[in-house]
Image: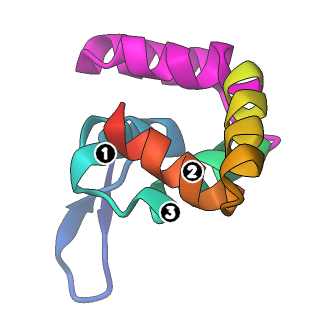
Amino acid sequence: MHVEIMMGNTVNVYDIEHTICDIIRDRKNQDPKKFSRVWNLYLGNQNKNIWKLRRYAVISGISIYWRLFIISKDSIVNKLRIIAGELSVCFNDVLSQFIYYI
């Protein structure tokens, strides 16, 4: 979709699912903590459309990553909490490193 801004220029505007896919595709260049925060905000959003996200992910060639985040999220989070406890480190640090390296 295109929107004209106040200065008269036209810019592309994307929905949240398209933006999330862009972030996942470029996750290696993202701050892991910000990536984690954006992802969790999306998952907590009542207006999220997982099927649209899946469709964009398949088109973008990142379907493996979105499945990892959606399908396995709870079991992965629980395992990361255990690891954080065993290492006596902050859970968010462990999560950020996990997201960065996958």
Residue 100 in the image: state x and y as whole percent. Answer: 36, 45
Instruction: Work out which residue is located at the far bottom of the displayed protein and give it.
Output: 7
Q: Residue at x 56, y 60 (%)?
A: 93
Per the image, the residue denoted by label 2 is 94
Q: Report the disc number at residue 27.
A: 1
Our reading of the magenta stretch's main secondary structure is: helix
Of 78 and 41, nearer the camera is 78
Q: CA distance from mark 3 to mark 2?
A: 10 Å
Q: Please, what is the three-letter code of the amino acid marked with disc 3?
A: Lys
Q: Which residue is mark 3?
A: 33
- Of the residues shown, which amino acid type is indicated by label 1? Arg
Looking at the image, residue 64 lies above or below residue 76:
above
Q: Residue 71 sits in which quadrant?
A: top right
Direction from residue 19 to residue 41 in the image, left or right:
right
Image coords of residue 87 (percent x, y): 66, 51
Q: Nearer the viewer, residue 97 or 17?
A: 97
Residue 43 position (above or below residue 56): below
Seen in the picture, residue 65 relative to 83 is either above or below; the reply is above
The part of the image, by quadrant, that contains residue 8 is bottom left
Residue at 48% x, 21% y is 66
The amino acid marked with disc number 2 is Val
